[in-house]
Image: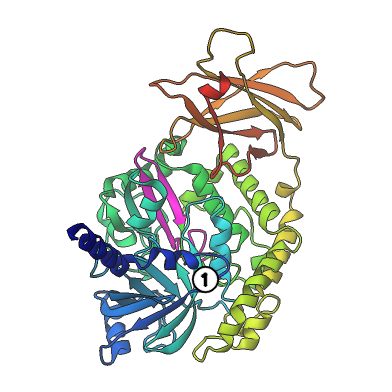
Amino acid sequence: MKSFLANVCMLMAFALVSGSASAQNVNALFGTDHIPEMRLTIRQANWSHVLDSMKISGEGMIVGAAEIDGIKYPNVGIRYRGQTSYTYDGDKNPYQIELNYIHPDQNHQGYRSYTLSNALRDPSYLREYMGFSIARNYMDVPEANFVRLYVNNTYAGIYVNIEPVDAHFLERRMGEAWTSLFKCSPDLVEDGGPENCKKNVFSNLEYEEDANCYLYNYRLKEGDGWPYLMELARILNLEPENIETVLDVDATLWMHAFNNMTGNLSSYSGQHSHNYYLYRDQAGLFSPVIWDLNLAFGSFKNTGQGSDLSIQEMIELDPFLNADNITKPLISQLLSNDFYKKVYVSHMRQLMHEHFRRDSFRKRCEDVMTRLKPFVEKEKNGYYTLDDFTKSLDKTVGTRSQIPGLAEYMEERVSYLKRLDAFTVVEPEVISVDVLKRKKYETVDINSFTISVIAGKLPKRIHLYYRFDKDLPYTSVLMEPKPDDKLGNGEGRFVSKIKPSDGNIALEYYVVAENTAAVSFYPNGYRQTPLTITLEELN
């Protein structure tokens, strides 16, 4: 009997903290075929004014209750969030929700907190959802979906629900293989900061010797990493040839490629060098995480050089924007390297091919809008009319902000980029990748990985990237060219032998083929699903 009662108590506690497991599995919070319903209950009088006060002071949360798809959570933390998306006494402000504000382990489907975006300056509601869903194929980015939000039983409208970038975000992706996390979104006061510090640097990673200058432009969210951030800035600006010792260069080039391709200037690429995070892994490498995409796809138009661009100028945005801008060292220092520049163009080309080919992007947008429309129709406090929402894929909305049609903008942008010389060059082609196996009657086991690559279209070099553990950074080597009379013109064979140590028996790897004008990756999904092989398979 005692055991039975103990089990009942444990089940009741679990239901309180994280809801019914079977109920949670019915509809995934960040699924693609369901728009969850979230209800917030706030008993405090004048709660909206209290939240305004907390937002202005930058402190505190109201304690209320939340209900997500019928599962109830008591004592959650609620506050307004955002900079430009927040309005004092506004009808549809963005929210930060913390299920674990009072109960540390309280969560819904493993998620303890949520960032609800009001999709300001986005009549389609799709910019953040589509942006994160595309970027997720190549980078560590937050999950994103929509919610139907009710506050005290009053329908507040459709919000974009975004997974916060915090310790839990990193733990879900890397376990304990990280050491610190910085938010690179300073207060947008252009003449602020200590007297002896540079002005208007925001979070651009310019190097300054005084540590106090970093305190103003970056926020340490987790860990203890100020000396490492300063070292990153120092090497980036003063020793760029050593940048791979402190930065995941490939992940950073993906961020730049995504921002430029999608006209996302409310980012490092634009006026304020902000809206991204930096986390440092146990190997000592920083990686970026993009954030706040409601102004992507041409909605925000200022590069920091002069006045806002026109929509046509956004369509024709230079793919090498800031390549010569010393105040944007995370771009200019990387793109000054010929190989990194080829990688960057390759990433832009892959984005075009995999997400913006023909009308694939438009069809995805239309499918999501069909699901959203019934709930948008019910909104009373939205920033845009239902007509604005309906035409937002093809028509410019607004006379002042001039928000371009989402699908039309990307179709014209891709059409423009495809005509540029950088995107018309011939890429090298990886034809095959093989690993030497033990022959049928050989008695000696193979104890190393001999990798052979055949590439076409005039390969100049083949870079092999490999590691023995997913928590380690990749090591790169140039593969050795091997003459082969059986190959056709413009083809080449390259070989490398990797000998494992410390008992390692498995290898993760990918290759980058390079010719005079371009590079290409094999496999395309190398960041999520690299090639793998074990010594057991070879024997």
In the current view of this chain or complex, which residue is farthest to the front? Answer: 1
Amino acid carrying mark 1 in the image:
Asn
Relative to 63, is 352 on the left or the right?
right
Q: Nearer the viewer, residue 106 or 403?
A: 106
Q: Confirm whether residue 185 shows in the render.
A: yes
Give the image quarter of residue 100: bottom left
Residue 403 spot, x, y in % from top left: 61, 77
Q: Residue at x 55, y 89 (%)?
A: 378
Q: Is residue 274 magenta?
A: yes
Q: Nearer the viewer, residue 498 or 82?
A: 498
Q: Residue at x 44, y 39 (%)?
A: 243
Q: Which image quarter is the C terminus in?
A: top right
Q: How many marks can you see?
A: 1
Tell me where the magenta segment starts and ends, as one range: 266-289
Q: Is residue 499 above or below residue 425?
A: above
Residue 280 spot, x, y in % from top left: 36, 46
- Badge 1: residue crowd in 10 Å (few <14, some 14–19, many ≥20): many
Q: Residue at x 67, y 53 (%)?
A: 354
Q: Nearer the viewer, residue 135 or 215?
A: 135
Residue marked by disc 1 = 294
Residue 338 spot, x, y in % from top left: 60, 38
Q: How is the image coloured?
A: rainbow
Residue 270 spot, x, y in % from top left: 51, 63
In the current view of this chain or complex, which residue is farthest to the right? Answer: 489
Relative to 166, is 397 on the left or the right?
right
Q: Is residue 499 magenta?
A: no
Q: Is residue 113 above or below residue 507?
A: below
Q: Residue at x 58, y 68 (%)?
A: 33
Q: Nearer the viewer, residue 241 or 379?
A: 379
